[in-house]
């Protein structure tokens, strides 16, 4: 046994320093070799041979690790006849009425007064993570996103200032093969800040019925239009460019604080920068484009259909490279491109065993049900699709109590180790390839102390800080 352990250690040492984990390394490291392949081919829906041949999404820039498989349907997200375009509102809009209804008239105002009192008091007390420089980092990071409303300013649904659209020059729009068109757009998305990009087909059911008090409608028109009562999407827009930006994990390690929440607000502003320029680029090629962040349509299902990640217990998407530590946005367009496919890297299956986010959540928001279901939790949920629905009322109420967004659940997730260290790749490959090890992987994550809160003040002392707090090439892509 000792001999075997030494050999295994040697194999591990040999693999250290490599930037990627190959399939061969993986089976050697877990010491199961052909045996694992045999077990896995039985317990996994795809055989090892099929895995070897499975196409990978993403093109040259967003090539996935070998343990990420493309599949025909998302691993979670079946729909029934209740699934229609969402007519409800988000929890932010619903919260006041729900609070007063649950706790009596005036409960909301009392909570808001206490929140404002705490903001000032904690600044005065210099409470770590809630000092003036922490809170202003959070608010300042929102600036780009808050500068324009959906359909206006940088989020214009029509040409802003690009002078090269071929129609203006008496030329035809840019054309190439669907694959080349997709690669072109992904390359530009990457330049503009995308950690991940994929192409999904339009699904009108993901598009909200209302945005900014206006009806969102699909019509047989050439150009998108935003008027006083309607936001008009041309029916010919059959392609959705789904993009993700990385959020700063080091900030999220300080959740729940105002400092930690700067990771989320900076993500939204980075998305505004990205999708507004990507839309203008597409218009410059001679096509129509509508940039959106959280507005107008649900970002998550498009991202899942585009193969960026899998649905999780967070009722948010997890990516193979960055776990849940991403923010999502999308651009609708009539530019023809090759579609990507959903992926399976074992995340949704692992969520059935893990439940770490639900245990870490201080407000009882996340589901402990083993399997996803169609059981909604309130009017903030769009019914008719399979997921782990969350109680957003509890979450939002907790945010009011702590005066800022939270993010403990994102930080807790074992998929967060966004780097090329082989050990983290080994864990993710094991989760993907060895379902029998899911419980062990969860225990190991706890044993190594991952997902616990770091000292907020330490963040201000970091050296060699990458721009935007993220290293765009530290993922497992190879
Ligand atoms: S953000 Fe915080 S309160 Fe909300 S679900 Fe996550 S851990 Fe719970
Ligand atoms: S913490 Fe565990 S259960 Fe929650 S999303 Fe991550 S993997 Fe899934």
Image (cartoon, rainbow, N blue to C red):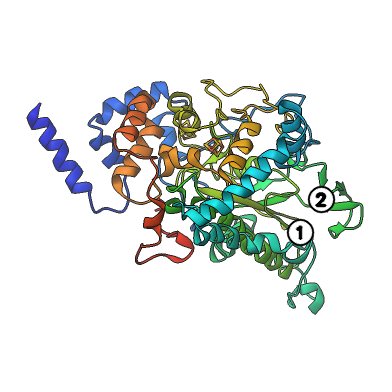
Q: Considering depth in this image, is 295 or 340 the residue closer to the camera?
A: 295
Label 2 environment density (alpha carbons within 10 Å; few <14, some 14–19, many ≥20): some
Q: Position of residue 346 (x, y in %)?
A: 45, 32
Q: Which quarter of the figure has residue 146?
A: bottom right
Q: Position of residue 374 (x, y in %)?
A: 66, 22
Q: Secondary structure at mark 2?
A: loop
Q: Is residue 188 left or right of residue 280?
A: left
Q: Which mark is residue 274?
A: none
The reply to whether dot 2 and dot 1 touch (C-beta < 8 Å) is: yes
Q: Is residue 9 left or right of residue 270?
A: left
Q: Position of residue 344 (x, y in %)?
A: 50, 35
Total of numbered circles in the picture?
A: 2
Residue found 71% across the figure and 27% down from its top: 103
Q: Considering depth in this image, is 124 or 285 the residue closer to the camera?
A: 124
Q: CA distance from mark 2 to mark 1?
A: 8 Å
Q: Which mark is residue 212?
A: 2
Residue found 63% across the figure and 38% down from its top: 396
Q: Which mark is residue 149?
A: 1
Q: Considering depth in this image, is 453 or 175 the residue closer to the camera?
A: 453
Q: Is residue 180 visible?
A: no
Q: Considering depth in this image, is 134 or 121 the residue closer to the camera?
A: 121
């Amino acid at each position: 046994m000792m001999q075997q352990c030494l050999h295994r250690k040697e194999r591990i040492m040999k693999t250290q320093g490599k930037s990627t984990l190959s399939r061969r390394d993986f089976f050697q490291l877990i010491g199961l070799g052909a045996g694992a392949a045999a077990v896995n081919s039985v317990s996994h829906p795809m055989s090892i041979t099929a895995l070897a041949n499975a196409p990978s999404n993403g093109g040259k820039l967003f090539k996935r690790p070998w343990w990420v498989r493309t599949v025909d349907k998302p691993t979670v997200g079946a729909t029934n006849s209740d699934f229609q375009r969402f007519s409800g509102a988000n929890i932010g809009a619903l919260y006041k009425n729900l609070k007063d209804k649950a706790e009596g008239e005036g409960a909301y105002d009392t909570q808001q007064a206490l929140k404002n009192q705490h903001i000032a008091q904690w600044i005065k007390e210099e409470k770590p993570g809630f000092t003036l420089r922490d809170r202003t980092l959070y608010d300042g990071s929102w600036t780009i996103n808050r500068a324009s409303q959906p359909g206006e300013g940088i989020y214009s649904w029509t040409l802003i200032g690009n002078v090269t659209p071929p129609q203006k020059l008496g030329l035809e729009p840019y054309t190439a093969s669907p694959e080349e068109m997709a690669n072109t757009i992904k390359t530009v998305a990457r330049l503009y800040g995308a950690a991940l990009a994929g192409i999904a087909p339009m699904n009108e059911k993901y598009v909200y019925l209302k945005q900014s008090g206006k009806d969102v409608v699909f019509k047989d028109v050439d150009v998108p239009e935003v008027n006083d009562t309607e936001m008009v999407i041309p029916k010919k827009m059959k392609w959705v460019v789904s993009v993700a930006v990385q959020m700063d994990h080091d900030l999220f390690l300080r959740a729940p604080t105002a400092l930690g929440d700067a990771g989320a607000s900076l993500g939204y502003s980075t998305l505004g920068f990205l999708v507004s320029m990507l839309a203008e680029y597409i218009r410059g090629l001679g096509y129509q484009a509508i940039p959106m962040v959280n507005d107008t349509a649900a970002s998550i299902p498009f991202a899942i259909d585009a193969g960026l990640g899998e649905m999780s217990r967070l009722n948010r998407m997890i990516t193979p490279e960055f776990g849940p530590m991403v923010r999502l946005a999308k651009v609708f367009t009539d530019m023809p491109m090759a579609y990507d496919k959903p992926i399976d890297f074992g995340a949704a299956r692992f969520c059935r065993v893990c439940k770490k986010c639900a245990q870490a959540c201080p407000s009882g928001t996340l589901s402990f049900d083993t399997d996803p279901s169609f059981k909604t939790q309130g009017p903030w949920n769009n019914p008719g699709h399979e997921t782990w629905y969350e109680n957003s009322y509890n979450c939002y109420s907790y945010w009011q109590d702590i005066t800022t967004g939270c993010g403990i659940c994102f930080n807790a997730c074992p998929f967060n180790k966004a780097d090329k260290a082989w050990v983290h790749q080994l864990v993710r490959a094991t989760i993907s390839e060895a379902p029998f090890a899911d419980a062990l992987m969860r225990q190991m994550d706890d044993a190594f102390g991952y997902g616990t809160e770091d000292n907020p003040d330490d963040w201000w002392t970091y050296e060699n800080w990458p721009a935007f707090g993220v290293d765009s090439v530290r993922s497992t892509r190879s």
